[in-house]
Image (spheres, rainbow, N blue to C red):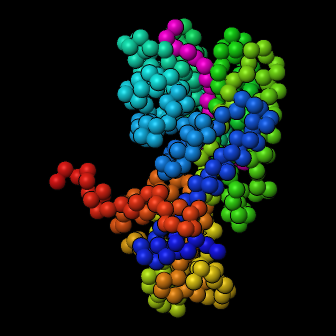
Amino acid sequence: MRNQLVLDRCIEKGCVYSLSPKTFEKNLRELNHSFSQIYKNTLVAYSYKTNYATSLLDIVEKLSMGHEIVSEMELNISKKIKASQNMIYFNGPIKTHASIKSVILNKGFINIDSMEDVKLIEQICSENNLIANVGIRLNFSLDDMPSRFGIDTNSDTLSIIISKLISNEKINFCGLHCHYAGRSLSDWKTITNKMIKFIQSLDKQIISGLEYVSLGGGFYGPMPNSLFTQLSSGKMPSYKDYASLIATQFKELTKKYENFNPKLIIEPGTAVVANSMKFYAAVRSVKKVNNKYIYTVDGSLFNLFGSINKPVDLPLSAIRNNTELKKNKDLNSIISGYTCIENDIISSNNKYELQVNDIIEVDCVGSYSIVMKPPFIRQMPEIVSEDNHEDLTFIKMEETVEDVLSSFAK
Ligand SMILES: Cc1ncc(COP(=O)(O)O)c(C=O)c1O
């Protein structure tokens, strides 16, 4: 049985996101457990950018996990939810003076992405007599996984940055970081090997000063096989598979050195949040054009992907009276969205025979959806809790026209 309150609300409002904080928490705990069972000093730092619904961030704080941020806005979000500021890991290519100063003051950690970051940190520390905890984001110049982020490990810039950091008494050079978009186990093998090789190339003194090594995010999380097969081939990696590949090798590395027991940081977003959110939209019109049924729902590709590009077919079901409909393989139909863009087609080969006020349910929409949804044509719908079947519980209210217009000057 689906949550009847959520379905009723969808009929009333046209569409609604349904979030399960419980699923998110379970994922975080399981991922952390998988790694820390092998390498005790593991820290999960949740990636805000993937989905910063405040009830999720509260869970991250409750579990004493890290907060991975990439902008001043995300830093301010972390302050609003009263996140422990010494658990902030500040990545990203652009960091403002104010955000860097705040992270330094509160003893968080900053991962450098450019020489400009170094200069700002040096300036802020010297002007304010502060000590900064600093790491370097590394770019291993991989042909198979090119990246525009981090400092090229083959460049002179890297040696210049390292000598600047170790010679400045106001800087605690204590971390290494990387993040690649590849999610497969073979991508992770490459990333882990590159990081380990890099660490082994460093002076022993630098190695013993490392308080953390962060390997970033980019893991697959739990999902139906029908979705995974669109993303990758082979077997879907579990949290345990990632842990036994990454944490085991990392543990072996630490055994080779005295006084080397850094935090192994992983920065999941998608892996823990994707399957904790569903999107529901009601069918509002049915028509036939050129022998094809067009079912228009009060939702859009913008609700699912934040854009009109549709990278995958997300798991989709159709519901009437809280019962999943059967498919009719001979049906010629599409499910389309509320925008005026021709390509706003949620399902181009739909097999559910739909009526007005049937509901479509799209699963695994938790990552990069609500944070990317523009106010194009329709404001952001509300987010309600999937977990509470007794009372409708709001996680985010529907945006109002006032919200949408509030920052215009007139
Ligand atoms: C530095 C960093 N860490 C973590 C993440 C989270 O990655 P994902 O949500 O894809 O797992 C990202 C995503 O871009 C990132 O840039």
- Relative to 352, residue 267 above or below: above
Looking at the picture, how far across and down is residue 271, in whole percent?
65, 50
- Relative to 181, residue 341 above or below: below
> Is residue 71 among the parts visible in the rendering?
no
Q: Which residues are magenta?
A: 169-185
Answer with left or right where residue 367 lies relative to residue 117: right
Answer with left or right where residue 301 lies relative to residue 214: left
Looking at the picture, how far across and down is residue 104, in whole percent?
46, 22
Answer with left or right where residue 74 lies relative to residue 60: left
- Which is nearer the eye, 32 or 159? 32
Looking at the picture, how far across and down is residue 205, in whole percent?
68, 10
List the single residue furthest toward the front. Answer: 390
| Residue 242 quadrant | top right
- Which is nearer the eye, 230 or 59? 59
| Quarter of the image where the C terminus is located | bottom left
- Residue at 58 percent of width and 54 percent of height: 21
| Quarter of the image where the N terminus is located | bottom right
Q: Is residue 358 magenta?
A: no
- Residue at 59 percent of width and 47 percent of height: 269
- Residue at 41 percent of width and 37 percent of height: 76
Looking at the picture, how far across and down is residue 202, in whole percent?
70, 16
Q: Is residue 176 magenta?
A: yes
